[in-house]
Amino acid sequence: MDRRQHRRTGKTAVTVGLVVGLGACATGCGGATAEGAGGATGDNTVTFLTRAADTLRSTGTSKATTSMEMATGGTRVTIRGKGVYDYDRQLGRLTVVLPQDPTGASEHRPITELLAPGALFMKNRGAGVPADKWVRVETTALSDGNLVTGGATDPFAAAELLRGTRTATYLGKTELAGTEVRHYRGTADLATAARAASPGNRASLAAAAKGFATAEVPFDAYLDDQGRIRKLRERFSFVNDSSKDTVAVASTTLLYDFGTPVDVKLPRSRDIYAGRIAENQPAH
């Protein structure tokens, strides 16, 4: 299979399995003039948020928990993930758990995802894929840049989206898992974020800016005293290709245990599946 065919196959597999498939399952079954960090006001609040990704990169590593809620047809489904991330190398590993079948009779097998600049690797991903093989997807070929498709937003890509912050309001201090954090609410622009992003996320965020129903992303960000993201909730909107319905997605990322050891190794070429994947069967 040549590179172009491989890219198309991977894109179809992920889109149908985790976005279109779950979307079908669901159908069937302020201002920038408030106080910021350290007493900063106005534009300083926006600047503080646009630098959050750089702060994570200098921090090194952390554990991460993700949650993705998809609402369509009056029903909501949730995909959850948990793992680790190396912000300097931009490599992560998540175990993603899909929701139960509509009948509630059985659960899908967890999917192991490896996150890398420009690529997503998945194991236990769908019918027809051998158990010992990985599926590789080029995230730049996805219309959402893999902010939604994989069922979990790449933690560093989520942070880099804040580089596109247009407006932000400081809502005060609160406590999150025993840590005092500052709560910010604002709106980021995907196209602006893409231009300011690191080389590894630039093309993926640019694809999302073109592929989503709107390039504006409302967010709630919770940062600790060191400027590290502890919680980030971002809301996306895209059009389901099959039903043409607009699907609302809320992605939440929790970061904790900074400095935890992270060793992510990407699959070897011979371990990557190059065949065709059944398009109408979600992972299970």
Image (cartoon, grey):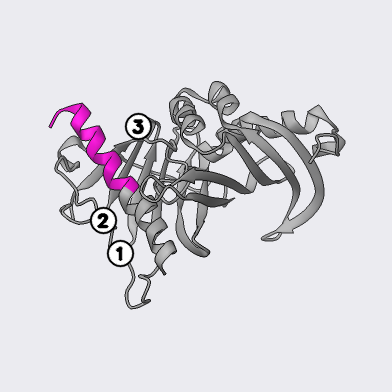
- How packed mark 1 is, by other alpha carbons closer than 10 Å (few <14, some 14-19, many 20 or more), is some
Residue that carries the numbered disc 3 in the rendered image: 141
Residue 215 placed where, x, y %? 57, 33
Task: Give the spatial CA distance, label 1 vs label 2.
Answer: 7 Å
The residue sitting at 42% across, 40% down in the picture is 146
Would residue 275 be found to the left or right of residue 238 on screen?
Answer: left
Between label 2 and label 3, give the one nearer the viewer.
3
Q: Is residue 149 magenta?
A: no
Which amino acid, mark 2? Asn
**Distance Cα–Cα, label 3 vs label 1:** 26 Å
Do labels 1 and 2 touch, CB within 8 Å? yes
The stretch of residues the image draws in magenta is: 1-15
Whether residue 224 sits left or right of residue 53 in the image: it is right
Residue 191 location in percent, x, y? 56, 26
Using the image as rendered, state which of residue 195 and residue 81 is in the foreground. 195
* Image mark for residue 197: none
Give the structural element (helix, strand or loop) at label 3. Answer: helix
What residue does disc 2 label? 124
Q: Position of residue 94 (x, y in %)?
A: 41, 51
Task: Describe residue 225's horizontal placement relative to residue 115 as left or right.
Answer: right
Disc 3 marks which amino acid? Answer: Ala
Q: Is residue 271 left or right of residue 113?
A: left
- In the rendered image, which quarter is residue 79 located in? bottom left
